Image (cartoon, coloured by chain):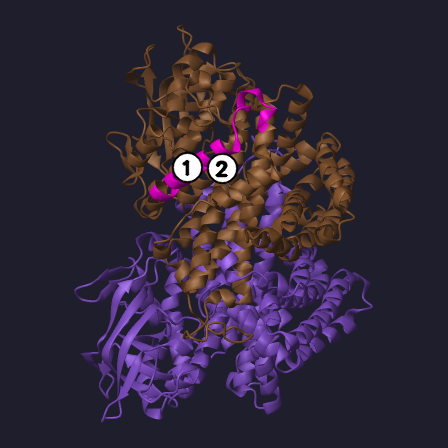
Chain colours: A brown, B purple
């Protein structure tokens, strides 16, 4: 029933050889003491937990799903989920990257991020329970009052309590400005919250003793639209000042959604029936407060698809080495066997390498972004923090959309390696495809990400953020432009960088005349930038591999071949994408809605 | 819970205005009397059956699935399936395109094909029950003895009995040469069949009184590999000479597969335990006999994805007109409502138009291929039959692989239009994606189709078949080359045709040195040819639309916009595909299997 082994060697390559995180973290006072050995040890332990505890619950969790007892409003999670969570808490994993002031271990996000890749690879549905808690922790940590932090953060950090984000309502998804949940101020300073929320991941379960819901709602005098939304803390059980649990707050799971995937996670419709809540941050500034959580969540969604890509790849690879079917077109490769293992066939290799390249490219890229977040939060120099913040702003929608689109492609290719068996639940591959599908939707659909990137991150500052990141690519191109062995990577990278500059200017010009040009170009544009970033990181990784390929560690041979595959077979997508992005709004907009 | 309306107007456009089937059928003596009015009437009735009877069972069938009673070896299909089948039989649909000699109505395949689009759109899982019967009918009709035909065909034609194809075994999927099921000759001229088969669609159910299994097996003295495979007729109940049912033949469903989709179809593991069978065709020539069935099945699989594309499009369109969310970037379009319907957003239109264009392109293309099959089978002139046969050989793998890849893309885009609701089973969209996934796998994976196309259909005759089809495109280009209004279509079509010629020659040259070059190029090559064919049909459709757009029927405005969208946003995929196809085998083959 499948396998998962944490890709520790590649993680070490990315963290130590590519990004030199030890040196980078020395610049960040709270993390200055963290060395490579500590990081490797954490990841090794995390990998064991993922493989040994979570992975065996993945397929069974999918089959069993969650069940609501409508009488008691309790949700039963799949067998083993609760116990695994207890082990997770006992081992201290929830606190890994949390603030030591509240009981955290204070490790950087770049390490936590790698942990989450492994947890998600082993069991995305399970990982969403602690994953959302971590988001709630970050939001409260950034915007809570000292009292709120004192009361809630230690419990969230320890994992004793978990958290959720309650945003969506039936008529209000992408368009949060339309939400209707009400918050009425009470004489004691609390708020009485009433409304209905949908799609609340981990909204109800018995894995933790309390659930801290962060709920978006409107105050009575709130202006319409997004400027009238406030954020409230609405715990399932009202905590007493000493942290013990008081009475049940009327925020109940009314129904569980039947979904395409992530069956092990309880996706709840929440009925909020005059529940007691506390304001977080300023009135009517709820979206600002929530954005902290949403940015972290977007990186987290990227890691979900990275995990699925990796585990789907590992299983498809094992199958391709084992399954005997047909002979190689260039002559038998296993003449002693009744047929060759299917890994001899070029197109099977194309499918495998697609998943491998998207896993390795995504791992490098997302680790880089996580490290920028650590810098944004912890670097003593404001200019460095600002630079990192700009990079994070620019790259986060790419992490979310590009990595989840790639995860969909990669899991589907990995499933295809199995032929008919891929469609059969027992082999586990089709679950990865189903689970991967939600990642393109939630935390802002990939269309929304592309509009955020092109409209808000690139065009509003006339491309300044993009140019800054581009300068980094440019200096790498110049450093290596005379190196013959690097030309197979540098030439296409430089070519693409130039095309991106032109494309961005062209869209910018068109958008000034017609804002729909942004919407027409945004989705292919985001994928073009994704490829630019991956090409850059693959070129950097290839450089290291070229330098070390003679040292006897075959890892570098493999890395080099993956980079070459990426440039030969995946990067050419940009030729399509640029044409699509340039084709403009007219072919989309000319037809009246009634004539569709 | 969704909707489906048969796209009769577009079917009429394709059959009458684009392909002029009435004129074409006049050339085929058995179909010479069939006029447009008859065809339209059949399709209208078929559309009603699909919408009224089958569509309401689709979602419930998916949720309920099939259930095996292991004691009695009986399979219970979802509620309503049996009754719908009875209505289908009572209305005479199984006999639509069958031979009048055996009770058929003798309509051409091009009409049956259009019927199957509608049945599949309404309920793919259900449609597989009669669909496989039709394949069994065709195989027996082509290769059965007069006695076999006399006994079996009338029952298959009426729908009283259904059929299956029993090919796959656990260790033998694509590689049929490895199959092990045994057939021992008996003194009475029958064969005793023993073995195990998997993935047998519609392998057991109670919808028909008997099931006619066509089973591939080996005779005792059979040579190894594909040259030692024979085809056997193995009925569930042994029929007496008068057609009444005798004793139960020991071919039993041992288990049902749990699958990603098509839950309403019973996918069986079949245990064949000394069952009585009759040889069909020559000993050891079973694959030849089966190929009749497989070619028809490949067209049928294309129609499955076409149906799913259409129904997914219709539902996404209705949702996009209804769902209010955000304002258009170019200013409010529904100022009286709290937000604009999401069809105002360019990227929502891109998703919708992707599905619309793939539906309309696939409808034109598959109808053309079905008409070629009618000509291949029924035209009095041998040269015309041979020409049609060549076209069918060339185009069938494109129908199967290109249309099913497009179905996967289109259903996923249609699901994405729904945002989070797309992931929820209740809305029905995620089922289309799950159902569409199998079509890329069964009846020969899409990789196998691509190898068939490039290796067997294009390179073996040095591109003669392709040139013949290309000449048809070329003459269209020349006829319209001076028409200014057509240049937006003719220019890119001519450009692509030229590139295909060069690409084919280049791959042919490389393949002479290294056969793995075929495997490396085949998948993108097939999609390039698919786009060439779609570009050709969209250009032809655009020509008609340009001529008629002023006549007040807004259908032509819509058709023209769809063609423009296709050229602007979908055809550019060829820029990627050609680069991929040209990148060669090295980036796929250089890495040793152990270093993956």
- Residue B326 image position (x, y, % from top left): 58, 33
Query: Which residue matches tag 2?
Result: A114
Q: Is residue A137 a member of the stretch shown in magenta?
A: no
Q: Name the chain under label 1.
A: A
Q: Is residue A446 visible?
A: no
Near-viewer residue (B267 or B126): B267
User: In the visual, does A587 lie left or right of A175?
Assistant: right
Q: Residue sitting at 45 percent across and 49 percent down? A: A311
Say which element carries label 2.
helix
Per the rendered image, the range of residues in magenta is: A25-52
**Numbered badge on residue B390:** none
Q: Are marks 2 and 1 in contact (CB under 8 Å)?
A: yes
Q: Residue sitting at 33 percent across and 16 percent down? A: A238
Tag 2: Cα neighbours inside 10 Å, few (<14), some, or many (≥20)? many
Question: What secondary structure predominates along the stretch shown in magenta?
Answer: helix
Query: Which residue matches tag 1?
Result: A46
Near-viewer residue (A466 or B431): A466
Tag 1: Cα neighbours inside 10 Å, few (<14), some, or many (≥20)? many
Q: Residue furthest front?
A: A551
Q: Is residue A128 visible?
A: yes
Query: Which callout, 2 or 1, points at the residue further toward the start of the chain?
Result: 1
Say which element carries label 1.
helix
Quadrant assignment, res B146: bottom left
Q: How many angstroms separate mark 2 from mark 1 (CA)?
A: 9 Å
**Image height of A550 relative to B249, above or below:** above
**Image height of A423 relative to A497, above or below:** below
């Amino acid at each position: 029933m499948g396998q998962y082994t944490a890709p520790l060697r590649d993680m070490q390559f990315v963290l130590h050889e590519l990004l030199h995180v030890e040196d980078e973290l020395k610049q960040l006072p709270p993390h200055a003491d963290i060395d490579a050995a500590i990081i490797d040890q954490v990841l090794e332990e995390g990998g064991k937990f993922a493989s040994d505890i979570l992975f065996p619950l993945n397929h069974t969790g999918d089959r069993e799903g969650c069940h609501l007892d409508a009488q008691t409003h309790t949700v039963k999670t799949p067998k083993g989920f609760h116990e695994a969570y207890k082990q997770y808490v006992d081992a201290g994993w929830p606190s890994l990257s949390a603030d030591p002031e509240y009981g955290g271990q204070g490790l950087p996000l770049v390490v936590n991020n790698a942990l989450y890749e492994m947890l998600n690879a082993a069991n995305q549905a399970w990982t969403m329970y602690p994953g959302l808690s971590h988001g709630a922790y970050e939001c409260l940590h950034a915007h809570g009052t000292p009292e709120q932090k004192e009361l809630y953060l230690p419990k969230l950090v320890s994992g004793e309590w978990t958290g959720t984000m309650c945003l969506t309502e039936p008529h209000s998804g992408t368009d949060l400005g339309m939400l209707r949940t009400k918050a009425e101020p009470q004489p004691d300073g609390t708020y009485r919250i009433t409304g209905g929320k949908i799609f609340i991941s981990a909204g109800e379960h018995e894995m933790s003793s309390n659930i801290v819901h962060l709920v978006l709602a409107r105050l009575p005098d709130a202006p319409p639209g997004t400027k009238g939304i406030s954020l409230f803390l609405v715990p399932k059980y009202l905590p007493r000042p000493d942290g013990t649990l008081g009475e049940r707050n009327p925020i109940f799971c009314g129904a569980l959604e039947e979904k395409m995937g992530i069956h092990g996670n309880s996706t709840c419709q929440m009925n909020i029936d005059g529940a007691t809540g506390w304001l977080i941050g300023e009135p009517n500034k709820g979206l600002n407060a929530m954005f902290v959580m949403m940015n972290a969540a977007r990186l987290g969604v990227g890691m979900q698809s990275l995990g699925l890509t990796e585990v789907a790849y590992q299983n498809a690879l094992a199958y391709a080495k084992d399954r005997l079917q047909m002979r190689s077109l260039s002559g038998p490769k296993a003449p002693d066997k009744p047929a060759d293992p299917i890994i001899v066939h070029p197109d099977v290799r194309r499918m495998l390498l697609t998943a491998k390249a998207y896993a390795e490219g995504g791992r490098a890229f997302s680790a880089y972004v996580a490290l920028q977040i650590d810098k944004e939060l912890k670097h003593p120099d404001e200019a460095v923090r600002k630079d990192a913040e700009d990079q994070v702003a620019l790259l986060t929608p790419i992490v979310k959309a590009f990595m989840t689109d790639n995860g969909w492609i990669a899991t589907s290719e990995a499933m295809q390696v199995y032929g008919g068996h891929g469609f059969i639940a027992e082999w586990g591959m089709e679950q990865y495809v189903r689970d991967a599908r939600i990642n393109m939707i939630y935390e802002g659909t990939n269309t929304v990400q592309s509009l955020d990137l092109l409209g808000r991150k690139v065009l509003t500052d006339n491309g300044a953020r993009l140019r800054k990141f581009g300068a980094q690519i440019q200096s790498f191109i110049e450093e290596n432009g005379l190196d013959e062995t690097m030309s197979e990577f540098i030439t296409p990278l430089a070519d693409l960088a130039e095309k991106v500059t032109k494309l961005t200017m062209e869209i910018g010009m068109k958008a000034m005349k017609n804002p729909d040009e942004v919407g027409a170009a945004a989705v292919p544009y985001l994928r073009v930038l994704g490829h630019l970033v991956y090409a850059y990181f693959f070129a950097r990784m290839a450089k290291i591999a070229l330098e070390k390929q003679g040292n006897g560690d075959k890892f570098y041979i493999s890395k080099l071949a993956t980079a070459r595959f990426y440039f030969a077979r995946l990067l050419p997508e940009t030729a399509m994408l640029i044409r699509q992005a340039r084709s403009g709004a007219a072919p989309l907009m000319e037809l009246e809605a009634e004539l569709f």
